[in-house]
Structure formats: C-alpha cells, structure tokens
C-alpha cells in the first residue's frame, strides 16, 4: 500500500496509486453521504422550527381564549357581588320601613286618644275662667290647636308616606 494520510477518517493520498483511489473514492462518497445527512439534519431542524412556531401560535391563541374567559369570569364575579350588595341594601331598607310602619301603627292609638279629652284638658273661654292661663295668653290657645292638629295629621301622613316608599321600593 501507499503512504496515505488519514485526517478525520478521510484518506489523503500522497501517491497516485490505484489502491488509494478506491479508498479516496469511497471516502468521497462517504463525505457526500455525510453532507447529505447533515443537510437532512438541518431540514429536520427547519421542520422542528416550523412545528415550534405553529405550537407557539396555538399556545398564544389558547392564552388569549383563557384571558377572555378569565375576564368574563371576573365580570360575572363583579356582577354577582354587586347583586348581593343591592340585595343586602334592599333588605336593609325593607326592614327599616317595616320597623317604622310598626312604630307608626303603635303611635296611632295615642293620636286617637287626643280626641277623647276630659273636661280639665279642654280650653276654657274668658266667661268660664277669667283667671286661667289660656285666657291671659291667647297665643297658647292657637299653639294648642296647632299641636292637636299636628298630633292627628302626622301619624296618618307618615303612614301614607311609608306605604308609598314601600311600594316604590318593591
């Protein structure tokens, strides 16, 4: 055989012999095959890169869908919390109105009792009692009449307004 130099499994023939030509020829074929395999590996990387790109696009679309679903869930939670707050406010106002209606219904008999005066609680004229306080100060008579009028009108008026508020609330 000849003195051939092998570098990285490739034969470099220093002599022009027929034995080396076969070896060099098969090495050249191996190099071509190796280059083709290298190109196929690069093609595989390109295919993997394209596949990764498609997966990333799909992941972005799924992330956007997830974001939209999370946003919709947040809106639903906020609406639910607002509804609960409004329901609590409604219940609070409703119970307040019921309490005020009960209180006014209890006060109503006292307003009716003011109509049943005994003689000592009625005002007297100047002929009946010349030395009485209401005769000396006539403005007390006017004040007493207004107070009795308010005593009779206010419970009815407050009941009517409370019933109106209850109807408006419902």
Image (spheres, rainbow, N blue to C red):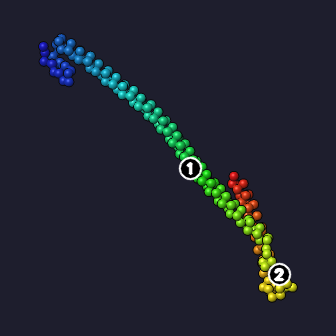
- What distance separates the C-alpha of mark 2 from that of mark 1? 65 Å
**127 w.r.t. 163: above or below:** below
Mark 2 crowdedness (10 Å alpha carbons): few <14, some 14-19, many ≥20: some
Q: On the rendered structure, is 86 left or right of 114?
A: left
12 left or right of 68 in image: left
Q: From this view, report whether residue 28 is shown above or below residue 82.
A: above
Which residue is tagged 1? Answer: 81
Residue 54 falls in which quadrant of the image?
A: top left
118 or 148: nearer the viewer:
118
Residue 124's tag is: 2
Percent across and percent down for residue 1 are 12, 13
Q: 104 or 12, which lies in front?
A: 104
Residue at (78%, 79%) from the top-left corner?
120
Q: Residue at x 18, y 24 (%)?
A: 7
Label 1: which secondary element: helix
Give the residue displayed 80% in from the left and 88% down from the top: 131
């Amino acid at each position: 055989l000849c003195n051939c130099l092998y570098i990285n499994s490739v034969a470099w023939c220093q002599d022009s012999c027929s034995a080396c030509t076969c070896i060099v020829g098969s090495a050249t074929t191996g190099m071509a095959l190796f280059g083709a395999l290298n190109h196929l590996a690069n093609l595989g990387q390109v295919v993997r890169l394209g596949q990764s790109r498609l997966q990333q696009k799909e992941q972005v679309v799924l992330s956007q869908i997830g974001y939209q679903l999370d946003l919709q869930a947040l809106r639903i939670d906020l609406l639910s919390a607002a509804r609960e707050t409004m329901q609590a406010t409604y219940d609070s106002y409703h119970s307040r109105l019921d309490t005020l209606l009960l209180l006014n219904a209890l006060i109503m008999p006292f307003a009716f009792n003011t109509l049943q005066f005994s003689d000592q609680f009625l005002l007297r004229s100047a002929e009946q009692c010349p030395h009485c306080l209401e005769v000396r100060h006539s403005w007390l008579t006017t004040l007493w009449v207004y107070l009795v009028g308010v005593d009779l009108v206010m419970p009815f008026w407050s009941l009517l307004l409370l019933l109106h508020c209850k109807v408006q609330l419902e």
